[in-house]
Image (tube, rainbow, N blue to C red):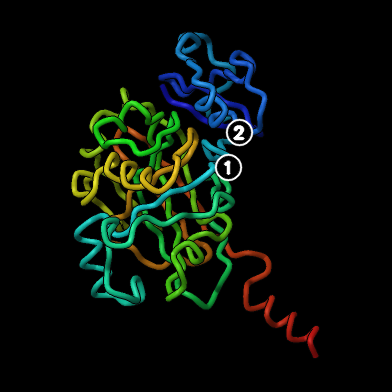
Amino acid sequence: MQFVRFNNDRLGLLTDDDGVIDVTDRLGLETNDPLKEYAKEGLDASEFADEDPDYDLEEVRVESPVRRPGKVIAAPLNYENHVREAIADKDIVTEEWFTIEDKGYFLKAPSSVAGPEDGIKLPFNDRRVDHEIELAFVMGEEVKDVQSDSVWDAILGYTILLDVSVRGDQDRSNRKSYDTFTIIGPRIVTPDEVGDPHNLEMELKLNGETRQQENTGDMIYSCADIVEYASIGMTIEAGDIITTGTPEGVSAITSGDTIDAEIENVGSMMVEVTERDLAFEDIHVEKSQQDD
């Protein structure tokens, strides 16, 4: 199955011909985060999969699949070629490189989550901000101290995630947590339709030019490894987002850019980059004027 959240917190099933079956009322979903509610309640929408669609996909506004995950858990430097890239470019990593085993995962603010149609809004016009394409997944049930072999049954489905990153020496969770810096979508695809998550081609184009292209089989730590490690320190809940790291090819984005991201068997999305109405240095200027 393939899920979308659309039109102000409706949950839909996608049909083969890009129709949308609205299962919100059919399943009795009541919150403004219907996919997270679906996961927590252990519901099954498959009985509605053969019904006639209520909408065409092009008629609806697609939102981030999960509105506000409890956590966004991210793996640092999880592709060897990106490790080499980061070592060579100190704008990417200002300290010695590390992996999950060295210093663990990091967290992104749930408020940074947005959908493809929301776009990326840059808070700075004087600092480097990069794109990073990643395979991500939504947890379908709660796990704690789970062994990697047992993780697979707890995954609800996979999606594309853009981990937008300000470069600098601040903590990762700071510079990766601005609003719209976690673009997720456009859909969640269940494991039976994705196949092997470690054999998927992914590609990111910036203004039509390929910048990142990799097979997920080149991850250092698998999807299940990341969940196993993270679950040692915290309870991972249904609806949490796990993201698996980016390959080489990260580069700066600026207002007016267009990003096209695609992962095999998962989908594709187009995201526009704009600048916030009030840039960060403008806030400092206003504060200084007030202080005067």
Horizontal placement of 212 versus 284: left or right? left
Foreground: 267 or 82? 82
The residue carrying pointer 2 sits among few (fewer than 14), some (14 to 19) or many (20 or more) residues within 10 Å by Cα, namely many
Foreground: 203 or 280? 280
The residue carrying pointer 1 sits among few (fewer than 14), some (14 to 19) or many (20 or more) residues within 10 Å by Cα, namely many
Q: Position of residue 54 (x, y in %)?
A: 59, 17
Q: Which mark is residue 68?
A: 1
Indicate the quadrant where residue 101 lies: bottom left
Label 2–label 1 contact, CB within 8 A: yes
Which quarter of the rendering shows the N terminus? Answer: top left
In the image, residue 165 above or below residue 68: below
Q: Position of residue 92 (x, y in %)?
A: 35, 71
Of helix, strand and loop, which one carries label 1? loop
Q: Residue at x 48, y 61 (%)?
A: 173
In the image, residue 118 above or below residue 30: below
Q: Which mark is residue 236?
A: none
Which quarter of the rendering shows the C terminus? Answer: bottom right
Q: Residue at x 45, y 40 (%)?
A: 235
Q: Residue at x 60, y 33 (%)?
A: 33
Q: Position of residue 204 (x, y in %)?
A: 34, 52
In the image, residue 284 above or below residue 211: below
Task: Say how many tags the image has.
Answer: 2
Q: Amino acid at mark 1?
A: Arg
Q: Which mark is residue 33?
A: 2
Of helix, strand and loop, which one carries label 2? loop
Q: Amino acid at mark 2?
A: Asp
In the rendered structure, which disc, 2 or 1, sits on the residue that comes first in sequence? 2
In the image, residue 106 above or below residue 10: below
